[in-house]
Image (tube, rainbow, N blue to C red):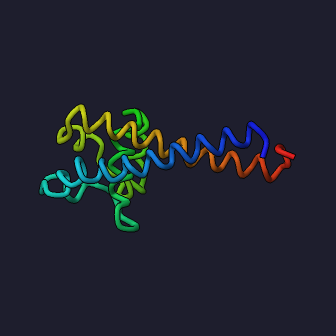
Amino acid sequence: MNDLESLIFSISLISCFLAMILFVLFGQITVRKLRKNPETKSHLGLEFVSGWDIINVAKALALPKWLNDKLEGTPLFFLYADSDLLYKHTTKFDRILARLFYSLLYVAGSSIIMLTILDKFGFFE
């Protein structure tokens, strides 16, 4: 392993570990409260597997408004959480936690993908 490969791998591992911790915290602090609220309970997006609604809510609170509006205008709207409704029922702390969690999750995923592609093309040899 050379230095660049080690750096990318380290960044991805650290961000993945922090994202796992924030996944649990965000689920317990914010999404639990939204699941208990009858007004927001059915607007958390489609849950493919257990806990997927945590990622849906984090994405709805972390992405910019114009992108959420674009996603909600598609025929696949039922897959996504309703960002306008979630903004009404969350605090500023919830939104900051969502942005932090989703950003770390995005960094972890994209750095692993980038590392795999660079390794496949022999960049580290």
Q: Residue at x 29, y 53 (%)?
A: 27
* Horizontal and vertical percent position of residue 7: 67, 38
Q: Residue at x 33, y 57 (%)?
A: 53
**Would you say 120 lies left or right of 85 here?**
right
* Horizontal and vertical percent position of residue 94: 26, 39
Which of the pair 117/83 is nearer the observer?
117
All told, the count of numbered labels is 0
The quadrant holding residue 32 is bottom left
**Would you say 65 lies left or right of 117 here?**
left
The quadrant holding residue 10 is top right
**Is residue 109 placed above or below 91 in the rendered structure?**
below
**Is residue 46 placed above or below 67 in the rendered structure?**
below
* Horizontal and vertical percent position of residue 46: 35, 62
Q: Residue at x 42, y 45 (%)?
A: 71
Which of the pair 102/44 is nearer the observer?
102
Q: Residue at x 17, y 42 (%)?
A: 89
* Horizontal and vertical percent position of residue 43: 25, 54
The quadrant holding residue 90 is top left
